[in-house]
Image: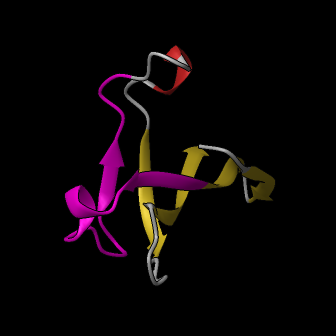
Amino acid sequence: MPTADEIRHLGGEGAWTVQDRVLSLPVLASVDVRPGQVVTYLTAPADPSLEGRQFTVVADHSQTHSTARRLQVREVTGQ
């Protein structure tokens, strides 16, 4: 995931963090990925800290002659 924007929120007695990132997937292997679906990292050799983390797809990708499908995903952590 090449980019990450992080926003910290406080509300009531809880605090949470929202991270927006870009997930790149092979075009043909990700045709059915849609906003609202949850992505779970099963393995991440380049960044083991991603293993087991879940991200929700928040925006679809559309581009002609694309070599990868770049999807905006969001992770919310905290209380």
Task: Name the quarter where the N terminus is drawn.
Answer: top right
Tell me which residue sits at (23%, 70%) in the image: 31
Whether residue 39 appears in magenta in the rendering, the answer is: yes
Along the viewing direction, whichever of 67 and 33 lies nearer the viewer: 67
Q: Nearer the viewer, residue 49 or 9?
A: 49
Question: Residue 29 lies in what quarter of the image?
Answer: bottom left
At 37% from the left and 75% from the top, the residue drawn is: 35
Q: Which residues are magenta?
A: 22-43
63 horizontally vs 42: left or right: right
Taking the image as shown, residue 18 lies to the left or right of residue 10, namely left
Residue 9 x %, y %? 78, 57
Look at the image and tell me whether residue 79 can be seen.
no
Horizontal placement of 14 versus 43: left or right? right
Identify the residue shown where x is 32% and y is 63%. 27
Q: Is residue 25 above or below residue 11?
A: above
Residue 25 in sight here: yes
Residue at 49% across, 82% down: 63
- Residue 51, horizontal then vertical, whole percent: 41, 23
Residue 68: image quadrant is: bottom left
Instruction: Identify the image quadrant of the C terminus.
Output: top right
